[in-house]
Image (cartoon, rainbow, N blue to C red):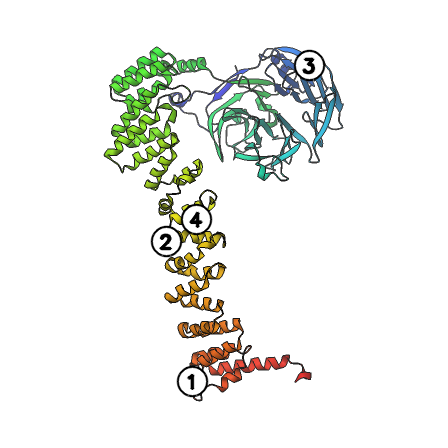
Amino acid sequence: MAEVEKGRKPSEESTDDSEEEDSEEEPKLKYERLANGVTEILQKDAASCMTVHDKFLALGTHFGKVFLLDIQGNLTQKFEISPVKINQISLDESGEHMGICSEDGKVQVFGLYTREGFHENFDCPVKFFLCYLPKLLLYEKNWLNRWKTSTLHEGEGTITNVQWRANLIAWANNMGVKIYDISTKQRITNVLRDNVSLRPDMYPCSLCWKDNSTLIIGWGSSIKICVVKERGHTELRDLPSRYVEIVSAFETEFFISGLAPLADQLVTLYFVKENSDHMEEFRARPCLDIIQPLPEGYEEISSDALTVRNFQENECRDYRLEHSQGESLYYIISPKDIVVAKERDQDDHIDWLLDKKKYECLFFCNQKIGMAYINHLVEKGDYDTAARKCQKVLGKNMELWENEVYRFKTIGQLKAISQYLPRGDLRLRPAIYEMILHEFLKSDYEGFATLIREWPGELYNNMTIVQAVTDHLKKDPMNSTLLTTLAELYTYDQRYDRALEIYLRLRHKDVYQLIHKHDLFSSIEDKIVLLMDFDKEKAVDMLLDNEDKISIDRVVEELRNRPELLHIYLHKLFKRDHHKGQRYHERQIGLYAEYDRPNLLPFLRDSIHCPLEKALEICQERNFVEETVFLLSRMGNCRRALQMIMEELEDVDKAIEFAKEQDDAELWEDLISYSIDKPPFITGLLNNIGTHVDPILLIHRIKEGMEIPNLRDSLVKILQDYNLSLVRIPESTR
């Protein structure tokens, strides 16, 4: 057996024996050395690479040999390939063809049983099958049974790793990792290398396909999990039909030598960072961890340090991790040792419990003993623990499960066992789940609601539970917990109209999600007022976004008796499109005047469908001067508009600006006539009319003795403007 230190961080200090025994967790993996023929091979030679097939193992060595071994490590075939190191071995899915590349630049591909194939020499060392400086080559047989070579990539230096799964090829060079789709002959992406300060020859890239679309990349201390996804038809254009999303990326505290999947977790073979404070003897040993990837980090599940032969002489690049998907076997390859890790089984679990003297846990390895232990817990009154142990002891025996449920009912503890009942592919009769739901309905509405959310709707007869909830609502008709749960039950039963009514009554946040998810727009045509009373902004946006399902006319009709809501809807419609609601622009004048005067003038300016006479009538009735001035000027009655500015607003600057816009001599005359006995207006005119009216004419009309504010400054400005205009006149015209 391979020596392994389990479950301890290298930096942890030793504690006393009893404390270690209490805190030690059961290991996830067990280890053994690959012996038999491997032992003899590695005494004389050193392992450089290995490839795992379901049927056999292929081991390459530093002395240029390739050995075929069975799963137990017994030698079955030997090939003298090269006088120098074998860098990589590749096998096809059937295990009938093998590709080998060696340090002297040779690539050989041949049939293991036919020996048919070819070999090529390159002028540089070949690092991996399919790759050499500076190209990545694909070798495949054509329909004439001849080997065809294709160049997939070149020009970025050494290709250091290649992994192929289904139609996807991933490879690494010193720049990063590329992914190529063979079916479409398209490069999908380039994942850049993070820590460029690490030498790639000392800390090589590890690549591993978890499945046909998930690539795991380990480089230095960085791990990334990439998922290849199909691009939508609307996104295609000139882009590849697939793209890559990095679903998890994080830094580790170690240098990665190899990666492999284990369900939704990762097996990582690593080398402790050199700048760590760990013990010297521990630092040199390779470690095998199981980790749970998270979006931006990871959780360590288990950690084992392996004592492989000659580990003191090895570096990070000397280790590799290969795995067999069929049997969940993980091979740790080092130059002088090969260790196999595998998941522990039930027998291993029992042995560990015996070794640790955990006799209580052993009860669950035998159903009779386990049942006796559950009975003991029930007699003690520890109902929650007894219910929890049922999961391990009863397992898939549905008859025993039902017996236990009825026992818990007899002792009044159905609630205790409710959260542990089977609810997956194996399940009890619906009556069992209904019995427990009725128990919760009697005294615990919140617990009842939790079970309805957690239990799949197929576990029980939905209509039976709906009727039970309805009966309880007769006693407490406004209970929000029961109403919300009833809406969820209606949703399970696809009675969305009934669910919608409840959500609207409760003003529940899920009402809009329910409408969109189940396309309930036809059901809300008579509930628009309720929706807007709940959330005006969301309701209006939803109605406008789904105009093809609920027409503008229908919304206006539904809101006819709620003008304040009608205004909000029509205002947002107008902001989106000035023309769609044109038939309602006349009505909107009154709505803006009543509920939103600040937006009335912008509406009058932007609408070309608004009846001006009606607008003028409304604005005059409400004495809206600014809006009336705008409408009068738009209708051509500029003199009346100017008069209102001067008399109602008493704003000389606005009056002058209005006269400038119209550029009408009669308007200027009206403005001067109105201003001649108002000193502040005269000051404003003197400062602004020089380019439109001769200021001398205004000065002559000022009554003698009238005090004009800032007259001196105004006259100086007029004279300066006059002199400037003389300067601009050519002498020949003076």
Nearer the viewer's eye, disc 3 or disc 1? Answer: 1
**Whole-Å distance between the Cαs marked 1 and 2?**
52 Å
Nearer the viewer's eye, disc 3 or disc 2? Answer: 2
Q: Amino acid at mark 4?
A: Asp
Task: Give the mark, 1 or 2, whose residue is nearer the N terminus.
Answer: 2
Whether residue 276 appears in this view of the structure is yes
User: In the shown orientation, is residue 29 left or right of residue 106?
Assistant: left
Residue for badge 2: 564
Residue for badge 3: 112
Tell me the quadrant of the picture where the C terminus can be found.
bottom right
**Whole-Å distance between the Cαs marked 1 and 4?**
62 Å
Res. 183 mark: none
Nearer the viewer's eye, disc 1 or disc 2? Answer: 2
Q: Amino acid at mark 2?
A: Glu
Q: Residue furthest left?
A: 475
Give x and y (percent) for residue 101: 70, 23
Q: Could you say which is closer to the camera, residue 317 or residue 121?
A: 121
**Whole-Å distance between the Cαs marked 4 and 3?**
77 Å
Give x and y (percent) for residue 550: 44, 44
Res. 707 mark: 1
